[in-house]
């Protein structure tokens, strides 16, 4: 008998195929003068002469270059022969698939329980789920850790079947019932003891026992799946921070107090998970607290070390990287505090964003970029499609009632995706449970919005796949404006949150106005101010910076006295020289929901802790989404009037309903435009709490760039746009489709070198070689056999390989277009 000991059968085109085989000779004698013959798809590819074959022969390796094969299924026949004929023979399937663009932008299915249930229930339901994920355009999903340890062969089946559908499955270290922190029969001494004396059913993350348990768990997973190149992500401990608290047993408490430098009894309390600000700080000046304030120090300690979440994540990443340095380990969400170090050791910082009542809350990508800048890692924002009960339709007592929780519509999803895409993130996630749910639950369109799945698929196919690498390879042009996300103001300040959700969202009412004024901004934190980064900006925005620390206050005053512009909202208590205060009132936005519109009441608290039904409601005046937009556009016009005199920008648009972000690569400028023009749709218009339907929009963009004769090329359509010179800059008219966007590349006419291309074709692939691309990012469109692909050159010369499918014709002609100039090579 010949068996395959290695578990992989599916390989990326371009990697070496490696099979490990073993032979069992069950005859009573050794076989003499044998030949081990390898036939691939019926053709002999290798033979080995074996003088003798004993009872057991293992460690037989067969290697083959996958570039010699077309994409699809193949059969390897391995036989052992001697003079008497064939003694042993076995056939092994091999599949070759195209490797996803490692520099592209992944489309991540951030799933819920139903997804895993579908993958784990049976192979039939798993394949059905994978088919649905493929049809939605997803390229990245996950399988559950505990299930995979119990059913490794089924996990391998999923990994390889997903690959055949263009999906890479990563590992999820799940969060259900406490996940890695879950108590599984351990005694009380190993669990978290709260300050109030309660023993939680969660393990204390500060013990050696817990660290050993985590280490063993990750090592078991990595030993099983390290050889599967597609398993290159590990998603850990999502949202578990909500369950954790400060461990206050004697040993842990001593550790906390030693690191803090003061006793816990000096604090008002130790619970800081989504806690509201204290309204009565002890100030050294109006709106200013001392640098050694204990409550601020504790907040920083708790979210970097105190609850053990960050240290556990770092440990998991460290072990995973020992096996696979290329493994992308990430966690989420980043929503409770502006402390990037909470994600230290992670390869990506991630968070989902609620976009009620405004998709422009997706500008939260700027907060993720701030964290990534500090950590040197990647940004992976997610779109949550769930609108909790009470958002689009009125609810009963339980905000988490499933029958009142509905998906967002297709156009809102596309606008959110466009905003994220325009920031060049590593991937875009979508949380909506599972595509399977539309069948399991009967397909109620009011709940599921089947069209949203089509929007995800079309955006993936038309935007992310062709242009994701380009977006990721650009960087924001230097911004003139910084928005301070102030940790001290999350500890002290006005209790009322004008934004309906988490602490890290609080700057985004004011920041939304900046985007409507087409002002690009960087989010900065207190450490940036102290590091002297204000020198890089002409203007500082203090949005919900209610209270400042003394050293930050001093640095801002110095900046203002030196001519820096400082503007603030009405909550800022500190006296900054020459500070312009805008009395914008955003509290009305809390009433832009179906509950408030139907009853003038809404939930007093909104979070994701669905272990408790939240029944407390408070009086909230209802307001429709179009009324909210009218107020926000009035505020934006007032802000724009101020900015026009004080901050002449290099980009503007004559409508606030086009959002702009300018990026660059080398000498090329890229203008990303997003359509924010919306109205009510038929599905959710009854309560008018969200404008879900996209409308076309046109506007004139004025951009001041250092080009004498600029060429404006819209890359999605391949059109050259007309540009007119004015005193303010170059005017270009944009016409954006409903829920659409644009990528406009701007180059100096005649400045780019003219590339030349050649290609070779063999039976398995097409190889394209382009020379004289220049040093700037250079996108090319390649068309053959009815396919249209975009590839980016990052150096003066570039090679691209396009594998051919099993029954695909060898192309007779290949068309290559330089997307920056429109010229055909």
Image (tube, rainbow, N blue to C red):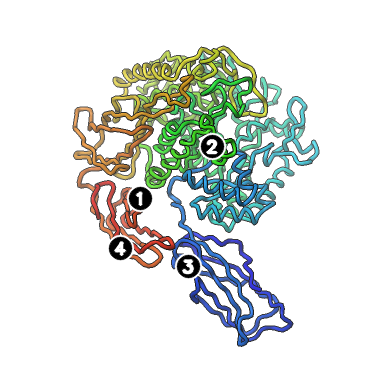
Let me know if residue 180 appears in the view: yes
Mark 4 to mark 2 CA distance (whole Å): 43 Å
Residue bearing mark 4: 812
Secondary structure under badge 1?
strand
The N terminus: image quadrant: bottom right
The kind of secondary structure element at disc 3 is: strand
Q: Which residue is mark 1?
A: 790
**Which quadrant of the view contains residue 416?**
top left
Q: CA distance from mark 4 to mark 3?
A: 25 Å
- Structural distance between the alpha carbons of marks 2 and 3: 38 Å
Q: CA distance from mark 1 to mark 2?
A: 28 Å
Residue lying furthest front: 442
Return the disc, 4 or 2, that comes first in the chain's sequence.
2
- What's the CA distance linking mark 1 and mark 4? 19 Å
Is tag 1's residue or tag 4's residue first in the polypeptide sequence?
1
| Label 4 Cα neighbours within 10 Å, binned few <14 / some 14-19 / many ≥20 | few
Q: Earlier in the sequence, mark 1 or mark 2?
A: 2
Q: Nearer the viewer, mark 4 or mark 2?
A: 4
Local SS, label 2: strand
User: Which of the two discs, 4 and 3, labels the residue nearer the N terminus?
Assistant: 3
Instruction: Where is residue 449? Give x, y as percent.
Output: 49, 33
Label 1 to label 3, Cα distance in Å? 26 Å
Percent coordinates x, y for residue 621 in the rendering = 51, 12
Whether residues under marks 4 and 2 lie with C-beta atoms below 8 angstroms apart, the answer is no
Question: Where does the image place residue 687, in percent across and percent down from the top left?
Answer: 49, 19
Q: Depth-wise, is mark 1 or mark 4 nearer the camera?
A: 4
- Label 1 neighbour load within 10 Å: few <14, some 14-19, many 20+: some
Q: On residue 431, which mark appears?
A: 2
Say if 705 sits above or below 685 in the image: below
């Amino acid at each position: 008998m010949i068996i395959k000991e290695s578990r992989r059968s599916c390989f990326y085109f371009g990697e070496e195929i490696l099979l490990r085989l073993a032979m069992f000779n069950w005859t009573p004698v050794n076989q003499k003068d044998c030949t081990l013959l390898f036939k691939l798809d019926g053709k002999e590819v290798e033979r080995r002469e074996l003088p003798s074959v004993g009872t057991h022969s293992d460690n037989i390796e067969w290697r083959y270059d996958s570039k010699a094969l077309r994409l699809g299924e193949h059969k390897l026949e391995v036989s052992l022969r001697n003079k008497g004929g064939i003694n042993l023979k076995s056939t092994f399937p091999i599949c070759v698939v195209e490797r996803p663009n490692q520099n592209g932008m992944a489309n991540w299915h951030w799933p819920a329980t139903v997804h895993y249930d579908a993958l784990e229930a049976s192979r039939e339901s798993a394949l059905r789920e994978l088919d649905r994920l493929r049809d939605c355009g997803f390229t990245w999903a996950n399988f559950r850790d505990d299930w995979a340890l119990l059913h490794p062969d089924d996990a391998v089946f999923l990994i390889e079947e997903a690959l055949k559908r263009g999906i890479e499955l990563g590992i999820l270290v799940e969060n259900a019932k406490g996940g890695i922190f879950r108590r599984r029969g351990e005694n009380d001494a190993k669990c978290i003891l709260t300050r109030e004396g309660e023993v939680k059913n969660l393990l204390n993350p500060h013990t050696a026992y817990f660290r050993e348990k985590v280490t063993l768990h990750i090592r078991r997973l990595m030993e099983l799946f390290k050889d599967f190149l597609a398993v290159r992500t590990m998603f850990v401990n999502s949202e578990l921070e909500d369950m954790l608290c400060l461990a206050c047993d004697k040993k842990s408490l001593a550790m906390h107090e030693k690191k803090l430098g003061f006793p816990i009894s000096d604090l008002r309390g130790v619970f800081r998970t989504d806690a509201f600000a204290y309204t009565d700080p002890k100030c050294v000046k109006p709106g200013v607290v001392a640098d050694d304030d204990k409550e601020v120090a504790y907040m920083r300690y708790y979210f970097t070390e105190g609850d053990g979440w960050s240290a556990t994540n770092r440990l998991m990443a460290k072990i995973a990287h020992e096996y696979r340095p290329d493994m992308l380990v990430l966690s989420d969400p980043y929503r409770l505090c502006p402390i990037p170090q909470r994600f230290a050791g992670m390869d990506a910082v991630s968070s989902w964003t609620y976009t009620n009542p405004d998709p422009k809350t997706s500008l939260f990508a700027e907060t993720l970029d701030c964290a990534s800048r500090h950590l040197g890692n990647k940004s992976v924002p997610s779109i949550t499609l769930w609108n909790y009960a009470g958002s689009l339709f009125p609810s009963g007592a339980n905000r988490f009632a499933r029958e009142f929780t509905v998906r967002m519509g297709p156009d809102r999803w596309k606008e959110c995706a466009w905003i994220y895409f325009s920031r060049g993130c590593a991937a875009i996630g979508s949380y909506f449970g599972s595509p399977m749910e539309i069948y399991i639950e009967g397909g109620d369109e009011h709940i599921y919005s089947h069209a949203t799945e089509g929007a995800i698929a079309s955006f993936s196919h038309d935007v992310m796949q062709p242009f994701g690498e380009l977006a990721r390879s650009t960087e924001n042009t230097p911004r003139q404006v910084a928005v301070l996300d102030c940790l001290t103001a999350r500890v002290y300040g006005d209790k009322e949150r004008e934004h309906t959700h988490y602490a890290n969202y609080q700057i985004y009412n004011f920041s939304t106005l900046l985007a409507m004024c087409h002002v690009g901004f960087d989010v900065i934190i207190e450490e940036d101010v102290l590091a002297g980064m204000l020198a890089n900006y002409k203007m500082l925005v203090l949005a919900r910076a209610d209270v400042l620390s003394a050293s930050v206050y001093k640095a801002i005053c110095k900046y203002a006295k030196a001519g820096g512009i400082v503007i603030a909202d009405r909550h800022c208590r500190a006296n900054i020289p020459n500070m312009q205060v805008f009395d914008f009132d955003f509290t009305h936005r809390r009433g832009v929901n179906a509950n408030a519109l139907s009853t003038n009441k809404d939930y007093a608290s909104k979070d994701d802790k669905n272990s408790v039904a939240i029944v407390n409601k408070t009086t909230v005046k209802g307001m429709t989404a179009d009324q909210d937009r009218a107020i926000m556009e009035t505020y934006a016009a007032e802000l724009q009037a101020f900015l026009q005199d004080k901050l002449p920008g290099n980009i503007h648009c004559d409508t606030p309903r086009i959002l702009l972000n300018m990026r660059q690569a080398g000498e090329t400028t890229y203008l990303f435009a997003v359509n924010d023009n919306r109205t009510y749709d038929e599905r959710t218009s009854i309560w008018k709490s969200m404008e879900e339907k996209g409308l076309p929009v046109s506007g004139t963009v004025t951009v001041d760039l250092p080009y004498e004769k600029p060429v404006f090329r819209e890359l999605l359509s391949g059109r050259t746009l007309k540009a007119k010179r004015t005193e303010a800059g170059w005017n270009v008219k944009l016409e954006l489709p409903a829920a659409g966007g644009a990528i406009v590349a701007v180059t100096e006419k005649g400045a780019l070198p003219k590339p030349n291309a050649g290609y070779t074709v063999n039976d398995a692939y097409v190889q394209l070689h382009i020379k004289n691309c220049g040093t700037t990012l250079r996108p090319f469109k390649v068309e053959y056999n009815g396919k249209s692909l975009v590839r980016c050159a990052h150096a003066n010369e570039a090679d691209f390989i396009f594998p051919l499918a099993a029954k695909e014709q060898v192309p007779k002609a290949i068309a290559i277009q330089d997307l920056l100039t429109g010229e055909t090579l």
